[in-house]
Image (cartoon, helix red, strand yellow):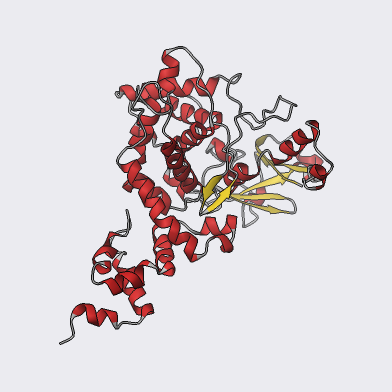
């Protein structure tokens, strides 16, 4: 009689790979533990599956978001062998986050552990790739929220922020503190910081330092007011990303600190009368297009390259520095158009019949990070202006280009103004 292991050994490799892949689909969160019993069936099965890069690449694509990675670094860098090597690495680090390792300092005199750098970079890069899967692995499996709270707010937190502030010293900005600050903003849920929780007020006071000390923490890199082409923070070494070394410079930490600070102020303080940013974790943000984080990725991998070349010239660099750098590509042409929503506009009616009221209700105020447009607003540009369809409204708003409004309507009150344009 044929035993079970012998029967499995006779299965073709393609079929065995399908069996192995579907054995990991029982649970989305966490490592593919359903594969372990199959690997332990026999040495032959273990040998055939452990070296199957295509299988582990399929598991990677099931567990993590892969489309942004392919868009950014190309399909040649996301071959099955690279994804197979990345899969165990990711879950090893996610398990360390889950166990809350390296979020606290073991010794008051030591600096943050080097392993925390790998951990922070992986979590940050996963959020830049996020289309839904990555955030679930970080939030629901790895429990990154309490890890970040320990890192930033605990007395022995690896960020050493509490330590510096207790000595009335400024916290140095480092690449990994910047990434950790962006991570906090990416996963921030205002409801997780109630007024009756002392840690919420502690977080507010810490972020206040980064958000309001504009003379210490720049909003741009290089700083907008400095003309000496020197990096604002120490130059980062090359970081391994999908088995390749890449130069990676995170954006300044002041931006996410300001966003987090304003969000927490709105949550904890009574009588805030202004619109505050919508965190990326908000359901309305998750419905946006999948290219949401492309700009952040480009800032990390491109910013500062031309300034580095210019600095090399000032330091006595050879002519080849100019030849190998990008030049004559920095000119910008801005084309702007101003569109007016007039108080009475018969063209708003699709039937051509004028409105009974002289008042036109403009768009409500939305997310400041989206130019105050409500999430889901659709704008279509036509020859005479723009047509705006707002969410949860049945009517259509027609804004007329200011230059096309006739003299007979010059005195009509303007209810709202939208400026559109392009940069070349």
Q: Is residue 319 left or right of residue 417?
A: right
| Residue 113 spot, x, y in % from top left | 41, 33
Instruction: Give whichever of 80, 149 is nearer the camera.
Output: 80
Which residue occupies 23% across, 66% down? 37
- The tally of labels here is 0
| Direction from residue 271 to residue 155 in the image, left or right | left
In the displayed structure, does residue 117 sit left or right of residue 342?
left
User: Would residue 143 be seen by someone viewing this image from the given angle?
Assistant: no
**Residue projecting furthest to the left:** 1
Q: Position of residue 404 (x, y in %)?
A: 79, 45
Q: Can the viewer see residue 226 in this picture? A: yes
> Where is 56 relative to 362, above or below?
below
In this rendering, is residue 33 above or below 16?
above
Q: Is residue 135 above or below residue 161?
A: below
Q: Nearer the viewer, residue 329 or 312?
A: 312
Q: Residue furthest top?
A: 168
Q: In the image, 124: left or right of 37? A: right
Foreground: 317 or 166? 317
Where's the N terminus, which quadrant? bottom left
Which residue in the rendered view is the most extreme toward the bottom? 1
- Residue ID at (34%, 34%): 192
Identify which residue is drawn at 36% across, 31% down. Answer: 149
Q: Nearer the viewer, residue 280 or 145?
A: 145
**The quarter of the displayed image where residue 194 is located:** top left
Residue 424 location, x and y as percent? 77, 47
Q: Position of residue 371 (x, y in %)?
A: 60, 38
Q: Locate residue 303: give its quadrant.
A: top right
């Amino acid at each position: 009689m044929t035993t079970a292991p012998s029967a499995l050994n006779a299965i073709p490799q393609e079929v065995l790979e399908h069996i192995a892949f579907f054995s990991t689909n029982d649970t989305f969160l966490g490592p593919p533990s359903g594969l372990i019993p199959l690997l332990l069936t026999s040495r032959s099965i273990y040998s055939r599956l452990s070296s199957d890069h295509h299988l582990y690449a399929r598991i990677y694509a099931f567990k993590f978001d892969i489309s942004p990675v392919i868009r950014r670094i190309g399909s040649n860098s996301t071959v099955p062998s690279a994804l197979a090597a990345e899969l165990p690495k990711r879950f090893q680090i996610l398990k360390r986050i889950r166990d809350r390792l390296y979020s606290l300092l073991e010794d008051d005199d030591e600096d943050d552990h080097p392993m925390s750098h790998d951990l922070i970079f992986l979590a940050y890069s996963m959020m830049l790739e996020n289309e839904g899967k990555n955030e679930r692995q970080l939030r629901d499996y790895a429990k990154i929220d309490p890890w970040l709270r320990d890192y930033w707010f605990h007395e022995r937190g690896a960020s050493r922020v509490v330590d510096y502030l207790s000595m009335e010293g400024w916290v140095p900005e480092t690449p990994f503190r910047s990434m950790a600050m962006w991570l906090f903003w990416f996963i921030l849920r205002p409801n997780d910081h109630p007024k009756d929780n002392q840690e919420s007020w502690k977080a507010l006071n810490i972020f206040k330092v980064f958000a309001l000390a504009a003379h210490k923490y720049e909003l741009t890199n290089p700083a907008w007011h400095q003309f000496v082409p020197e990096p604002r923070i120490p130059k980062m070494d090359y970081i391994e990303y999908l088995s390749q070394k890449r130069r990676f410079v995170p954006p300044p930490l002041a931006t996410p600190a300001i966003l987090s600070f304003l969000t927490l102020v709105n949550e904890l303080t009574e009588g805030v009368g202004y619109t505050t940013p919508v965190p990326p974790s908000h359901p309305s943000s998750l419905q946006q297009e999948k290219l949401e984080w492309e700009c952040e990725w480009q800032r990390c991998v491109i910013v500062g390259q031309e300034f580095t070349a210019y600095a090399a010239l000032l330091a006595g660099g050879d002519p080849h520095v100019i030849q190998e750098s990008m030049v004559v590509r920095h000119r910008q042409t801005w084309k702007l158009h101003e569109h007016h929503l007039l108080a009475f506009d018969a063209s708003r009616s699709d039937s051509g019949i004028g409105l009974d009221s002289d008042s036109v209700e403009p768009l409500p105020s939305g997310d400041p990070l989206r130019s105050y447009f409500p999430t889901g607003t659709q704008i279509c540009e036509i020859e005479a202006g723009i047509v705006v369809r707002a969410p949860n409204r049945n009517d259509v708003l027609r804004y007329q280009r200011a230059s096309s409004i006739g003299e007979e309507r010059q005195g009509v009150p303007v209810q709202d103004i939208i400026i559109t344009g392009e940069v070349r």
